[in-house]
Amino acid sequence: MEPGLLQSSNWPLLIDLYFFLGGVAGGAFVIATIANLVDGRRYQDIVRIGYYVAFLALLPCPILLIVDLGYPTRFLHMLMVSKPSTAIGMGAVTVGPLHLKPFSPMSAGSWALLVFGLCTFLCALDVFLTDRGGRSMIRLRTVVGLVGSVFGFFIAAYPGVLLGATARPLFVNAHWLGAIFLAVGAATGGAAIALVLALLRGAGAREGLTRVMRVTSMALVVELIALILFVVSVKMAGSAGISAALGRLLAGPYSIPFWLGAVIVGIVVPLVLQRRAGAPGMVALVSALVLVGGFLVKYVLIAAGQAS
Amino acid sequence: MARTVAMFTDVSLCIGCRACQVACKQWNQLAPEEPEWTGSYQNHATFTDKSYRLVRFFEEPGDDKVGMRWHMMSDVCKHCAQAGCLEACPTGAIYRTEYGTVNINQDICNGCRYCVSACPFGVVSFNHDTGTATKCTFCNDRLHNGLGPACAKACPTESIRFGFRDDLEAKARKRVDELQKMGFKDAQLYGADKGGALGGLNAFFLLLAKPAKYGLPEQPKLPQRNVVMDSLFSIGAAVAVGLGALLAFRGRGDDAGGS
């Protein structure tokens, strides 16, 4: 077959970094919220660190996205234009100048980023004020936490769905990218909390560390399963172009960062070490590996997809 | 909405002169580009931000009687009835015109480049000078003034024809029958069927061989078809992780160290 003409978005590292930080923020926020719901006082440290991590990780995200645009000053067009056309796609909703396209993950993601940004800000602010001896707005924190968790998971997962909705050979028949990205987000969010907790509290936070690491390990298992399903489903699609694209990921130029970085360093080693992890130093090491692996799995999937 | 217009490109009539490519560049005031060696007469290897029409050349080694076969095809944006670029665009810059064609509003596009990878045909290109995505406009300005696209106007062999979609489709079907009677067994239409892939293409083709021979996907797929299933799987993963986290935090303190 003659080569097709497919073109690539050629998104630079900025976007990989955004996908990674968005995942960390989403994962950390959800974990903090769940810890808060189960027992806010007992897991006080996890909740505080989780909300702070979510806020700080999300802070650079809009900047990364805006810098990447070909026309940075038009970033608001993601949400609104002065006169949206009516014929801009399936199920498009326009209210005044605002528009939302449910089948465009980038459009939905822009809105989600706005809402999630607000939630992370409110929760971080609440933690900050409580730390300063202010009265905790506990009910607000619960409501914002729950709403924000939905959007946090969304922010973690939607980049995968976004990639899946392209014509790139590696992605065109893949259905598991959203699940992979969500699991990576949860794992890296948990790892970020554990890392900070281990560094700040050390052995004093043994119980919290164990529990966060348990969440992280579970997310790693979900990630591993989703990765396997991704590879199998792409392989089953079977056309020559798609097989070549998968080959580049599994055996070609991207195989080393994929197998060694994403799978071994990012999933297998942390899962093995975590089983015998007790000391905060070990937890910090495992968390760092999860963070590195989480970035690499996203990086390598995007790179292989864009190159194929 | 006005009657849907279309372009019909009949590769059996294409002589590879590239008048269409030049006319497109002139009318749309697209800057010149450095030629590149693609191994054939084709220039460039893909659509670019300055080449909206692209005459593609495929050489096929023949048998003893026929030394070499040429396949030439003037390729262009397909203006799909279900367009991946249009669905992907987060700004609403890409819209469907009253003629049924797909256009990019250059004043709205913010250069996110999502449409570039969402096109199943690799048509949309990113212009680094303007910071926006560009592609064939179906000569929207000419359409509004009752003219067909410049490429169709320039084509000396009427390989590219412009007209209302239903009229052109009927003509195309007749032409396929003629060609098949003349012995071109593999003559076939690509994208003419409204019930077919992507809801039919508003720039459709008559090919003399299988689509793959022309580097076209046999069954182009709307990328956004993945969105629902991908989202459901993501929700599944979210439920698994969420429930797992809930269980991890619940258990009693003293069994926290156990597994």
Image: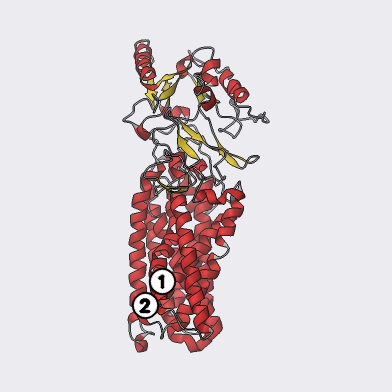
Q: Is residue A216 above or below residue A15?
A: below
Q: In which quarter of the image is residue A210?
A: bottom left
- Name the residue located 47 percent from the left edge and 73 percent from the top edge: A123
What's the residue type where badge 1 is placed?
Gly
Q: Which residue is drawn at 39% across and 18% down?
A: B168
How crowded is the residue under tag 2: few (<14 C-alpha within 10 Å), some, or many (20+)? some
Q: Position of residue A116 (x, y in %)?
A: 46, 63
Q: Do the residues bearing badges 1 and 2 touch, measured as CB atoms within 8 Å?
A: yes
The secondary element bearing badge 1 is classed as helix
Q: Mark 1: give few (<14), some (14-19) or many (20+) Cα within 10 Å.
A: many
Q: Residue A145 carries which label?
A: 1
Q: Which image quadrant for residue B254?
A: bottom left
* Left or right placement of residue A17 versus residue A229 in this view: right
Left or right relative to B143: residue B164:
left
Which chain is mark 1 on? A
- Kindly identify which residue carries mark 2: A37
Spatial CA distance of label 1 from label 2 is 9 Å
Nearer to the camera, A113 or A164: A113
Along the polypeptide, which appears first: circle 1 or circle 2? Answer: 2
x and y, in percent, of residue A255 in the image:
51, 55
Residue A37 appears in the figure: yes
Q: Nearer the viewer, residue A18 or A300?
A: A18
Q: Where does residue B239 sit, x and y in percent of width and height?
A: 33, 65
Tag 1 and tag 2 share a subunit: yes
Q: Is residue A164 above or below residue A278?
A: above
State how many labels appear: 2
Q: Can residue A251 be seen in this view?
A: no
Image mark 2: chain? A
Decide: is B216 above or below A204. above
- Mark 2 residue element: helix
